[in-house]
Amino acid sequence: MLKNRTYKVITFGCQMNKSDSERVCGMLDALGAAPFDKEMANVAPVSGSTPATGLTLPPTPDIIIFMTCCVRQAADSRLFGQVAALKDSPALIAVGGCLGQRDGAKLRERLPHIDVVFGTHNITRLPQLLNKALTSGRAQVEVLSDAEADAAYARAALVPVAAEPPKAVRVVAPSEAVGAAAPGTDITPGTDTVLGGDTASEIATVLDGDIASGIATDSDIATASVGALTPAPSIASAPPFSVPARREHPWHAWLPIMSGCNNFCSYCIVPYVRGRERSLPIEQLEAQVAALLADGVVEISLLGQNVNSYGRDLYGQPRFAQLLERLSNLGVPRLRFFTSHPKDLSASIISSFAREAAVMPALHLPVQSGSDRVLRAMNRNYSARHYLRVIESTRQAAESAGKPPVAFSTDVIVGFPGEQESDFEQTLRLVEQVGFAQVFTFIYSPRAGTPAAQLINDIPRQVVQERFQRLVALVQQSAHRFNQYFVGSSLPVLFTGASKRDTSILAGKSPANQTVHVPLPPKHTPHDFAGRIVPVRITEAKTWYLSGQLV
Ligand code: SF4
């Protein structure tokens, strides 16, 4: 039924969603469907006519798939707006991803013209659901709970079920963690948590004192995290990882190494829609990486909501640092990973920045706030002091190996309920101290179903906006300062093609993930350089990019 149908995938949100979308495209391609080519459709005068290409193309895709995000209200609202606008479209409409998982059949109550709803655990079922909707003419809704997902993964039998169950521990419900605290008050997570932060000084003690050298070791993290969280599922593999993907670039691959999150940050919906952590076995990842290298991939970005806790559900072995080592040993030229959690960035992961040539000198480490009080309300389980110590250790590790300075990037939430001016100033100080290459700044938006949504948020909008602007100004200075360091140096740049704004300029990425612009040499096309790593002498540094000349 899907053969020769055209489809369009519209993706909202994070890299994990982008990666899921690549798999959706891969599955549909494998079944004979074709990506919708808007330009070709535009030349077709009316639906069903035959354009010059000889293909019969409709003016709209046959199938439109939304891969949704519910992390922020903006993406949520945009999705509803876009789907509502398709009310009279003849296309089959499918909605998946985090909103599909969260709202399931409720989506159709609001938007009855949706034909297929699927969740985060069953993207591999999409072709069947589309087929069923096409043949029956009836809407299909299929969303798996986390427990059902475990059972489905077991049936997929990608890895043997672990012989021993994980250590049973008390689950700290997010509602317990923050209750109905008034804004600005201290919030006390469940008493069984190990890193659960009863007071800021206790967090500092656990994170900065009790653990050797102030940075957690892998075994510290395994113990601490397992003690604080839901028992890990016994099935450690996710079927979505095993389907083909259509990559955006032939030289780059997103590689999910795990899914889900056990952290329950108080503002975050992800653990509810992506489920608990499930790591993919290292052998499967090695096989996938070997295949990607054989296919000409030069840069691999490892993906997970908290990649630092990779392997925790595999009974602690292998851990993320070992994964980095084993993948580096396969000869990957460039390895990156997203996203890390400050409490789980262990000493052995940090030393990977020195040890593994493939690990690029760039680390995205969300801090969210520089105030311990706010961090506790967010249930982040680290202190600002710990965060700074992790940054400094990473910086030193790269420096000791003669690598260029690490480009640190982060996420900051402005206006979390109860954030006072003094809290925000601590955030500004931390941003200044780290000297971030990039900061993704967000204004807090409550997510229904999260503990933080129950908090009273009475910070005036104007105050939040003003704080946001101050932060953005500081971030720009910080990024500009970081880039200045590279003027006069030679960097190996992985070219991606022409600059979006000017086709006479080549664009690429430095090891630190900075955008680099270079004039296109005469008698060449951007295509000649795409996917190649070429040395570039940096001549100028702006806030968001570097300029240079081919060496
Ligand atoms: S670590 Fe926190 S913010 Fe990140 S996905 Fe998990 S719960 Fe959400």
Image (spheres, rainbow, N blue to C red):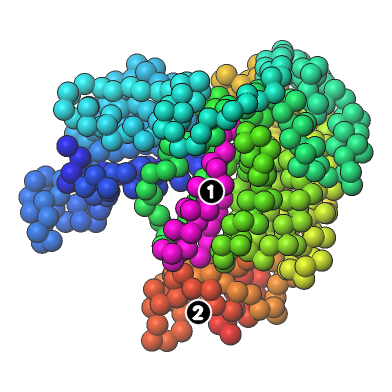
Of tags 1 and 2, which is closer to the observer? Answer: 1
- Kindly identify the residue that appears in the image at 53 percent across and 57 percent down: 300
Is residue 239 toward the left or the right of residue 234 in the image? left
- Rendered-image quadrant of the C terminus: bottom right
Q: Which residue is mark 1?
A: 283
Is 516 positioned to the left or the right of 171 in the image? left
Q: Which residue is mark 2?
A: 519
View extreme (front): residue: 163
Which is nearer the eye, 251 or 414? 251
Residue 6, magenta (yes or no): no
One can see residue 195 in this view: yes
Residue 29: percent from left, percent from top: 27, 48
- The image shows residue 1 at horizontal and vertical percentages of 17, 37
Tell me which segment is drawn in magenta. Answer: 276-303
Give the answer, above or below, for where 279 lies relative to 230.
below
Residue 358, percent from left and from top: 63, 64
- Residue 20 in view: no
Q: Secondary structure at mark 2?
A: strand
The amino acid type, in three-letter code, at marker 2 is Pro
Q: Nearer the viewer, residue 542 or 336?
A: 336
